[in-house]
Amino acid sequence: MTTTIQAPEDIVNLALSRIGFKGRIGSLYDGSAASKKSLDIYGQTRDELIRDGNWEFAERIVAGNLLKQAPASGYAVTPWSAASNPDLPWLFSYSYPSDCIDVRSIRATPMFVPNFDPQHNVFSLGNDTGSNPPQRVILCNVPNALITYAGRVTDPTTFDPGFVEALAAALGRRLAPGLVGLDAAKLEISDEQAENQLAQQEKG
């Protein structure tokens, strides 16, 4: 791919070119039919691809921001409180990262590096209504948790080339029926054929 990607409009124009649309957009906000339709779907389509894929540029690993925890002595001595403790039966509640699209794993912070046996742990996403205001949280039984997640990335200059192609293809399938009357299913088949041809060339 030789196109230099600097802005969302570059990806949209790549998608428009793929579906045979006669024209380009200058901005997602230029008021044209193509820009209006693109603006409606661009962010959602980008986030869906990040959520459903395994893109290294979007991976984030952060130390969990602890909000609440169960009392060390258990609830026999200290009664459970929605204002002070995580939802039962979880021991710890961490804040949900503001740019998080999908939580991938929860791990304990290793005491020694390298850690030759990293373990993934069970976790759940919840809505802490005991907080004011209520907030989305990550619930688990891991102290000092490390949270691995796919984060929202809005700067196209940091996208992988493969992600740019995937996003342009996905946008094209959604834009085609309304802009050029093409069947999105046919475009998907065409995209798959192109991917297979590229894979064969790389093997050769």
Image (spheres, rainbow, N blue to C red):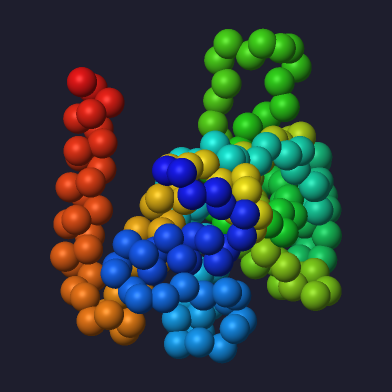
Residue plotted at (79% across, 63% down): 81
| Image quadrant in which you'd find residue 82 | bottom right
Q: How many marks?
A: 0
| Residue 5 x, y percent position in the rendering | 56, 52
Q: In which quarter of the image is the N terminus?
A: top left
188 lies above or below 44: above
Quick one: quadrant of the C terminus?
A: top left
Residue at 63% over, 32% down: 107
Q: Residue 163, position in %: x, y?
A: 46, 47
Residue 115, relative to residue 151: is it above or below?
Answer: above
Question: In x, y percent, where is residue 67?
Answer: 81, 53
Name the residue rendered at 26%, 36% in the picture.
198
**Is 43 displayed left or right of 157 in the figure?**
left
Residue at the far front in the pictured view: 22
Decide if residue 150 is in sight here: no
Left or right side of 202 for 86: right
Residue 69 lies left or right of residue 136; in this view the side is right
- Against 123, residue 20 (above or below) is below
The foreground one among 31 and 119 is: 31
Q: Is residue 198 visible?
A: yes
Q: In this view, does 127 lie above or below 197?
A: below
Q: Residue drawn at (19%, 30%), measured in percent from left and top?
A: 200
Instruction: Give the quarter of the image for residue 60.
Output: top right
Q: x and y percent of residue 22 in the render?
A: 35, 76
Judging depth in this view, the residue of 44 and 178 nearest the camera is 178
